[in-house]
Amino acid sequence: MGMMQEFKTFAVKGNVMDLAVGVIIGAAFGKIVDSVVQDLIMPIVSTIFGGLDFANYYIPLKGQGMQLSLLEAKKAGAVFAYGNFLTIMLNFLILAFIIFQMVRLVNAARRKEPAVAPAPAVTPEDIVLLREIRDALRKQSS
C-alpha cells in the first residue's frame, strides 16, 4: 500500500504533469513543423533545385532501378534513403530554431521584469530596546 501512495504522490506532482503536457504539445508542434517543411518549404526548395522531391532521393542497395519512387524501391529491397533523411534533418533544424527563438523571448521577458526589492527587515522590539539600553550605557560611561 505504501508504494501505491508514493506512486500517487509522484504522478500528481507538478513536474510530472508539466512534463506530460510538454510532451503532448511538443508532439503536436512537431506535426505542425513537419507540415510546414513538407507542404511549404520543401516544394520551394524542390523548385529551386529543378523540381525534384528530396524525399525520393535514394541509392538502391539491392539492384532496384533509380526510376522507382522511394516507396516502390523500399518494397523491392533495401535502399539508402538519404533524401528522406535530409528532409527530416531540415524538420529538426527548423523546430530547433523555433524553440531557440521561443526560449530567447522568454529569457528576455524575464530580464525585463523589474526586480522587486525585498522589504526591509523589521527589527524585533526587544532588539531595539537592548540597543537603546546599550547606547544609554555608553553615554553614561563616557
Image: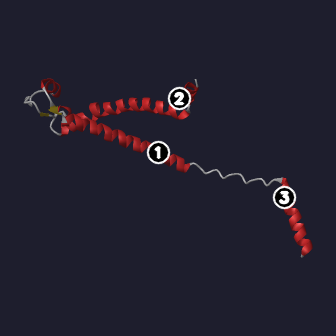
Residue at 87 percent of width and 58 percent of height: 129
Per the image, label 1 sits on a secondary structure element best described as: helix
The residue that disc 2 covers is 11
| Disc sitting over residue 128 in the figure | 3
Which dot, 2 or 3, sits closer to the camera? 2
Precedes in sequence: disc 3 or disc 1 = 1
Residue wearing tag 1: 105
Quadrant in which the C terminus appears: bottom right
Q: Nearer the viewer, mark 3 or mark 1?
A: 3
**Height in image: 128 above or below 44?**
below
Q: Residue at x 43, y 29 (%)?
A: 24
Instruction: Compute the Cα span from label 2 to label 1.
Output: 30 Å
Is 93 located above or below residue 78 in the figure? below
Residue 132, quarter of the rendered image: bottom right
Asked if disc 2 and disc 3 are in contact, CB closer than 8 Å, the reply is no
Asked if the residue under mark 1 is in contact with the one under mark 3, i.e. CB atoms within 8 Å, the reply is no
Q: Disc 3 residue type? A: Val
Amino acid tagged 2 = Ala
| Image quarter in which the N terminus is found | top right
Label 3 neighbour load within 10 Å: few <14, some 14-19, many 20+: few
Q: CA distance from mark 3 to mark 1?
A: 47 Å
Answer whether residue 44 is visible to the viewer in this image: no
Question: Which picture quadrant has residue 120?
Answer: bottom right
Q: CA distance from mark 2 to mark 3?
A: 49 Å
Q: Nearer the viewer, mark 2 or mark 1?
A: 2
124 left or right, relative to 92: right
Residue 99 rendering spot, x and y as whole percentages:
40, 41
Residue 54 % position (x, y): 19, 35
> Of 104 and 74, which appears nearest the observer?
74
